[in-house]
């Protein structure tokens, strides 16, 4: 199916060549607004404001109805309830997902851009073909139905301006092929329609001169000068002056083109300034296609665009590539500011770049540019922000045809500034850049498939920073990729281009040093302190680690580092997270004196310990998903804090961190991480305990809690006997120091693990001890855990009535104190008792209620275990087909997190699977698995919520087993 949209005139749409009915004005305005957004998402609220800007908007249901009708018109073959592919819902709003070529305005923009390139190369005939095709797309006023609508005003202005440029380019191409006679009439009409666009007057004068009408050509130029003076109070621009001088001199460049020597599109008199000064690209442009399109789009809609980002991220190269695609008849002009130190000379630098013989003042410079259609690129403005902002403000106010593109490590901060923050290259583009630059250094030695893993790792270590990647590629003449990757601990010595001129991009270190030099003293202080974070941080963390005499208020200083592109922001986080690129962090670490580094690391450890001990209190509650995600984000900081603590001899701090992470490591399956840090912390702690005096009790308790973490990850390895030994040692230590809360927890885990190892009688004795300990300390959450283990043991012993009582009490206690994991565990175990009692319908009700009310993010593995058991219960109530779908989903989703039902629940999961398979037969069973495997997390949650009422029909939804 092919869909075409036309906005260069009244709005129309065609599906497979047939025009479709788009409905009334308001409904059409919804579509027009989305087309004007050019693929971006428009919130529903914004659509309401734009479409009903002239009246009180109706209810949101009206908008939903319009969207539904438009979807039916644009996708007539879409099956009911199938997801839309064109007009899609995204977050809080809608977007139109169509190729650029499907919209005539986008096609027109491409054709004009391509024509401009052909004309620059002297291929005027080809340029004419593109321009004729583009101009033929116009059927009237752009967005003709909605020319005054808020969403269309800026788009109409952009398209009208581009239409005028296209006409000028076409007429320039006609002159270039010698068709000046035909062009004269069209040019006379053009200057009447656009009397303040100097380019039309220039072309008309040239055409008249070539037709032998020199006097009329000079009269036209005089008329242009008078119109500019009368209406704008401005003098003619350099283009008009060049043409006038060439006519007076009867310069040969004005002669019509000959058959053997095609003429350039724009005449230029000898000795006069060129029409652009961009340097030729010395290497290929790799990646950044999305960013290039974004800059191009921003320049089409805004007169000032600033590309910001850290040093070496590729701002200059992107700006130059964007400038080269511009169809402006004059320019673009590159103004390099890196070597400029005196802010009063910025205007003069612009004048010099434009080739003006006598540098004017700022007002005169603005007046000269005012009537021109040009782009000025100001490169590397960060060290002269104030003076550059003043000059730029004057330039963009000079006239509607002037565009300014700035590169800087921070924004200018003036009204009307549109910004694009340039991030590191994505992995695929980073490797492509490395391969392209290696091909230049070592011609004929391409990057092989065997090299790609090392190349990918190298690019990740270099943060995807183009400058760092290019400097690394330059070393391939002497070192292999693996050798380069192994030398990155000394990256600043390695990444040196060897240039003798001291250029700021000669080495990676000089690039970062340039940015550091621009920081204020408080910013330099905080910059150094933040280097102890690994993997990012939030504002609260920055305050705890970075506050000091030099920066008593961290927030404004942190914002300064963000503005200057030395700290990056992850905009999708709440609260916001910040991070340093790894190379920038290495540089900052090198600036920290040893004593300051030790103090900063100590503050970092204190912050991390407070975080993990707070998280420990919440992980087992209904808020556990949030805290689980929080700890996942801090994994790099956890490793950094533990490494620094052990290196500094802070064994107690390391042990406390590990002890607080016991549940996190266990539920997320961090076997390697938990074993590594847990064992290292225990070794260090044993050394401290041996030499301890009065503090020995605190150290022993820390070891007991640490062993709970070690025991959990040991269980995950499948070594139940070793886990039993670890938990027994923990329980003994707790008894030795009188730590009753931790003792009750250790005893509960020991009983559970003993049961897992097959020693049911021993587990029964231990579980009774755990229950007694929990009752003695009056901790309902610990008591709920202990009773859950005791109830499971009762079930294995065949005492279902007792199991029912224990699990019901465990569930009641867990809900009362908000211990959500115990709620899930006791309810899950209770559903199995219901099945054993011959009441599978009650198991379905219990498991449905638990699955629907629980956020899977709290504990994905436990949640999938509920769903797997639900599948077995459904099979036992005559709904095996739906049970097979659930099994397929559990298998697919479980594989992504390392959850395998038969391994984690060897007693009951095989029976649940068998119940489904035997009830269906193999073909239907396989079909159900395949259907379920296509569902994701969100789809599974939706399915459960939608089917719960049907599955539980006639059964009271009560969590926990019920009495017979």
Image (cartoon, rainbow, N blue to C red):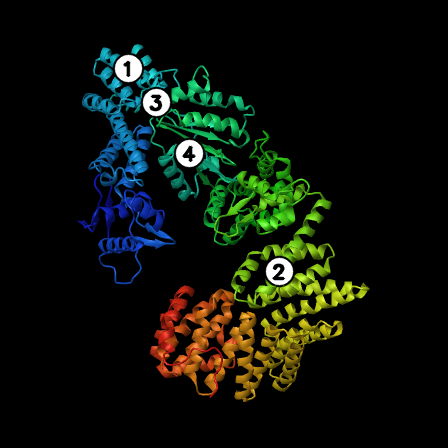
Residue tagged 3: 371
Identity of the residue drawn at 48% across and 22% down: 347
Q: CA distance from mark 4 to mark 2?
A: 44 Å
Residue 415, how many percent across, how many down?
Answer: 44, 33
Image-based side of 221 in relation to 380, left or right: left
Q: Nearer the viewer, residue 472 or 370?
A: 370
Q: Nearer the viewer, residue 400 or 482?
A: 400
Q: Earlier in the sequence, mark 3 or mark 2?
A: 3
Q: CA distance from mark 1 to mark 4?
A: 34 Å
Within 10 angstroms of label 2, few (less than 14), some, or many (20 or more) residues? Answer: many
Residue tagged 1: 221
Q: Earlier in the sequence, mark 1 or mark 3?
A: 1
Q: Picture quarter containing residue 246?
A: top left
Q: Earlier in the sequence, mark 1 or mark 4?
A: 1
Q: CA distance from mark 1 to mark 2?
A: 76 Å
Circle nearer the viewer, 1 or 4: 4
Quadrant of the image containing the N terminus: bottom left
């Amino acid at each position: 199916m092919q869909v075409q949209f036309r906005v260069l005139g009244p709005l129309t749409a065609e599906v497979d060549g047939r025009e479709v009915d788009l409905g009334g004005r308001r409904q059409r305005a919804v579509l027009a607004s989305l087309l004007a957004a050019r693929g971006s998402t428009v919130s529903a609220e914004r659509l309401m404001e734009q479409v009903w800007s002239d009246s009180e908007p109706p209810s949101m249901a009206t908008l939903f109805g319009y969207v539904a009708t438009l979807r039916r018109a644009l996708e007539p073959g879409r099956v009911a309830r199938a997801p839309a592919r064109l007009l899609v819902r995204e977050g809080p709003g809608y977007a139109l997902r169509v190729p650029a070529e499907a919209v005539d305005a986008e096609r027109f923009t491409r054709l004009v851009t391509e024509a401009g390139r052909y004309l620059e190369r002297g291929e005027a005939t080809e340029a004419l073909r593109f321009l004729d095709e583009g101009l033929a797309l116009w059927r009237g006023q752009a967005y003709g139905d909605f020319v005054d609508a808020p969403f269309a005003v800026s788009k109409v202005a952009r398209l009208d301006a581009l239409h005028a440029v296209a006409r000028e380019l076409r007429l320039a191409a006609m002159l270039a092929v010698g068709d000046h006679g035909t062009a004269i009439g069209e040019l006379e009409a053009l200057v009447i329609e656009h009397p303040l666009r100097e380019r039309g007057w220039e072309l008309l004068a040239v055409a008249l001169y070539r037709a032998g009408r020199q006097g009329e050509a000079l009269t036209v130029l005089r008329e242009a000068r008078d119109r500019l003076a009368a209406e704008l109070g401005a003098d003619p621009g350099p283009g008009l002056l060049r043409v006038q001088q060439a006519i007076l001199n009867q310069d040969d460049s004005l002669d019509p083109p000959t058959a053997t020597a095609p003429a350039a599109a724009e005449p230029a008199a000898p000795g006069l300034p060129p029409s652009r000064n961009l340097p030729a690209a010395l290497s290929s442009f790799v990646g950044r296609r999305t960013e290039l399109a974004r800059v191009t789009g921003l320049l089409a809609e805004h007169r000032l665009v600033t590309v910001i980002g850290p040093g070496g991220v590729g701002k200059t190269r992107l700006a130059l590539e964007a400038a080269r695609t511009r169809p402006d008849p004059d320019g673009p002009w590159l103004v390099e500011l890196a070597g400029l130190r005196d802010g009063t000379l910025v205007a003069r630098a612009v004048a010099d770049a434009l080739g003006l013989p006598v540098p004017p003042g700022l007002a005169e410079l603005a007046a000269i540019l005012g009537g021109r259609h040009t782009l000025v690129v100001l490169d590397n403005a960060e060290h002269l922000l104030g003076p550059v902002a003043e000059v730029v403000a004057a330039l963009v106010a000079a006239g509607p045809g002037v565009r300014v593109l700035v590169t800087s490590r921070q924004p200018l901060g003036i009204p009307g500034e549109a910004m694009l923050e340039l991030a590191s290259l994505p992995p695929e583009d980073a490797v492509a850049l490395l391969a392209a630059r290696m091909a230049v250094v070592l011609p004929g030695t391409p990057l092989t498939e065997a090299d790609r893993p090392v190349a990918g790792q190298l690019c990740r270590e270099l943060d995807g920073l183009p400058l760092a990647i290019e400097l690394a590629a330059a070393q391939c003449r002497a070192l292999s990729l693996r050798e380069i990757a192994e030398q990155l601990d000394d990256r600043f010595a390695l990444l040196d281009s060897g240039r003798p001129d001291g250029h700021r991009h000669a080495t990676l270190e000089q690039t970062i040093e340039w940015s550091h030099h621009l920081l204020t003293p408080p910013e330099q202080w905080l910059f150094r302190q933040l280097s102890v974070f690994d993997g990012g941080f939030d504002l609260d963390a920055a305050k705890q680690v970075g506050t000091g005499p030099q920066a008593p208020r961290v927030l404004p200083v942190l914002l300064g580092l963000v503005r200057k592109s030395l700290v990056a922001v992850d905009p999708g986080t709440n609260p916001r997270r910040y991070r340093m690129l790894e190379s920038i962090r290495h540089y900052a670490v090198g600036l920290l004196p040893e004593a300051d580094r030790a103090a900063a690391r100590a503050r970092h450890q204190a912050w991390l310990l407070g975080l993990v001990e707070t998280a420990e209190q919440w992980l087992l509650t209904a808020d556990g998903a949030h805290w689980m995600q929080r700890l996942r984000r801090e994994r790099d900081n956890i490793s950094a804090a533990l490494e620094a603590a052990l290196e500094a001899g802070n064994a107690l701090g390391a042990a406390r961190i590990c002890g607080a992470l016991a549940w996190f490591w266990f539920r997320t399956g961090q076997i390697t991480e938990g074993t590594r840090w847990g064992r290292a912390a225990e070794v260090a702690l044993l050394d401290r305990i041996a030499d301890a005096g009065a503090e020995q009790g605190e150290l022993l308790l820390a070891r007991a809690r640490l062993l709970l973490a070690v025991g959990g990850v040991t269980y995950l390895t499948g070594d139940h006997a070793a886990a039993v030994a670890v938990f027994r040692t923990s329980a003994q230590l707790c008894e030795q120091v009188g730590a009753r809360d931790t003792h009750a927890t250790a005893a509960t885990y020991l009983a559970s693990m003993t049961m897992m190892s097959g020693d049911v009688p021993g587990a029964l004795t231990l579980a009774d001890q755990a229950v007694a300990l929990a009752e003695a300390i009056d901790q309902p959450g610990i008591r709920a855990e202990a009773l859950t283990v005791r109830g499971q043991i009762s079930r294995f012993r065949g005492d279902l009535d007792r199991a029912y009582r224990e699990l019901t009490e465990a569930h009641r206690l867990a809900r009362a104190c908000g211990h959500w994991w115990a709620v899930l565990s006791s309810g899950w175990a209770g559903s199995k008792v219901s099945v054993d009692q011959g009441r599978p319908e009650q198991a379905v009700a219990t498991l449905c209620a638990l699955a629907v009310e629980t956020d899977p993010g709290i504990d994905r593995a436990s949640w999938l275990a509920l769903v797997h058991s639900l599948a077995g219960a459904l099979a036992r109530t005559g709904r095996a087909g739906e049970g097979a779908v659930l099994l397929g989903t559990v298998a697919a989703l479980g594989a992504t997190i390392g959850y395998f039902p038969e391994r984690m629940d060897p007693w009951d999961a095989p029976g649940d699977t068998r119940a489904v398979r035997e009830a269906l037969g193999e073909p239907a069973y396989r079909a159900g698995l395949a259907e379920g495997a296509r569902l994701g997390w969100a789809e599974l949650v939706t399915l459960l919520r939608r089917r719960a009422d049907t599955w539980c029909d006639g059964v009271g939804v009560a969590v926990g087993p019920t009495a017979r």
